[in-house]
Amino acid sequence: MTGHRARLLCIASLVAIALGAPAALAAETYDPWPGLVQDIFSNRPMNDGNDVIGIEMPARAEDAAIVPVTLRTKLQPGDSRRVVAITLVIDENPAPMAAKFTLGPDANVTEISTRVRVNNYTNVHAVAELSDGKLYVSKVYVKASGGCSAPAGKNVEEAKNHLGQMRYRQFTKSEQGPATSTREAQIMIGHPNNSGLQMDQVTQLYIPAFFVNELHIWQDDSPVLAMEGGISISEDPNIRFTYVSNGAKHFRAEAKDTDGHVFEHEWKVENPGT
Amino acid sequence: MAHGGSVLALLLMLWAPTIARAQEAELPVSEVAPGIFVHTGVTALMTRENEGAIANVGFVIGDSAVAVIDTGGSVREGRQLLAAVRSHSDKPIRYVINTHAHPDHSFGNAAFVGDGTSFVGHKALPRALAARGQFYLDGFRRTMGDVLIGEVRIIPPTVLVEDTLKLDLGRRSLTLKAWPPAHSDNDLTVFDERSGTLFAGDMVFLEHIPVVDGSLKGWLRALGDLTAIPAERVVPGHGPVSAWPAALADERRYLETLATDIRALVKSGKPIMAAAEHAAAAERPRWQLFDDYNARNATAAFSEIEWE
């Protein structure tokens, strides 16, 4: 359903781009958020997320193609609710729904970092869905990059060369040795993640969209994190996250893209703990 | 008398386009070697006030034709460059060479569209313009305004350089070289053997902090081949015309420092946001526009080096 809506949003923005500059100018005065709440969240009520979900981004998108974003859950340890999913929305982007992260019920993911494209001056919303069924929202404002930076690829041939490569890395936090069960890991997927919104000025045709739309991560057979991705995720999707180890010896990731490729990999966990 | 009148009419016809264009002020240029003219851009971001004239642009005059190398950051700058060409030569402008896709080098292209003029670029330039053109137009409309940006057209090259290409301007041959990804993924340099002048585009920066929009590792690899070009002087993309290859020293030091710092950050497991804050910090006092570009260079370099 969400995928269908995201597609509708894409089409709407293609039309906007086709109409040219006036759409871009109008975007600076028109707040798209109420419309996005309707399209992406079926107008469900939005609660203040200040105590539930944090979102961190640099105030300025230094590189329009690679803007780091960190989502952090803020629920207190005793809270009976848990975060089920977090949706990241970049209001002024051509396809605003950047990603929906679904958090594994037993993985206790509290922090997710990724990188996104930012096309314009924009609000960025993080919407957390809790186990009580309610939605909580936080936002930051990001200024577009200046200069010659663009949300498009920098090294298009190289991006093709490492298509489908996957890397896993485990980090040791200084305050968390192997004695605790909290872990931090990162999955990288080589993929150009083409947006499909770029028009070839010569042929007047759009360069086809080609991006990772699904990613699942497990420790043994227990889901840690899943991502439903859109074209606002940067080239070479990169997800860094914390989780609680269940003692699993293996970490597994599976990614799918819009051309039907499936990329899978499994890694041994260092110091599985517990 | 009647005869004289028709000659005058003919002359007027021939000169009419020049007269119309001459209404635009001439871009100040200096002749850095015989037949080689350069306008040195201001070291700044593109704004309404500077009309986008931040990059070095120039032209080379041969015995039979002129080649323009980069056209500036607005059609207005392009027209001023055209006026400067016309005040030094009435030979046809056969080639307009874009050293890469960035707007400060190519937004003036529309001023040179005409019969007999070919646009020349790296084989990857059309793709880069396709992917980025509309975004650049939208973005710079915000900072430069409708008047300057409204007349900008994205004009892709029709003559593509796969590896190297020689252009003959009449007893003056330009050697164009297409580079693997470095400053961008569509960098082209232009070497005039007769005067020993290298137009390096943004493969070379002086004073203005280098901007990484292609591949940091590729750029560092390219420096060896670049140094080997037997030039006497370089016209960098930004900064003063300088002696070659000594002009490369500062850029090499910056790029090496950036790569070393980023490798250390990646190795120690630091997140990408830390790169923007810490990488190449020692270079801050040595460059103009450091705070405008270093964080972005570091971010781009981090996402490249973490794949090592």
Image: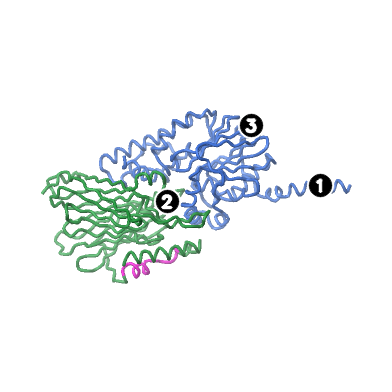
Chain colours: A green, B blue
Image quadrant where residue B241 sits = top right
Amino acid of disc 3: Pro
Percent across and percent down for residue A239 are: 28, 51
For the residue pair A181 and A229, the one nearer the viewer reads as A229
Residue corresponding to mark 3 = B34
Q: Are marks 1 and 3 in contact (CB under 8 Å)?
A: no
Residue A35 belongs to the span the image colors magenta: yes
Residue beneath the point at 39% across and 53% down:
A194
**Main secondary structure of the magenta stretch:** helix
Percent across and percent down for residue A112 are: 26, 54
Chain letter, disc 1 residue: B
Distance from the alpha carbon under mark 2 to that under mark 3: 40 Å
In the picture, which quadrant includes the N terminus of chain A? bottom left
For mark 1, give the secondary structure: helix
Residue A152 disc label: 2
User: Considering only order in the chain, which callout, 3 or 1, is on the residue closer to the N terminus?
Assistant: 1
For the residue pair A169 and B237, the one nearer the viewer reads as A169
For mark 2, give the secondary structure: loop
| Residue B294 makes an appearance in the image | yes
Q: Which residues are magenta?
A: A27-41
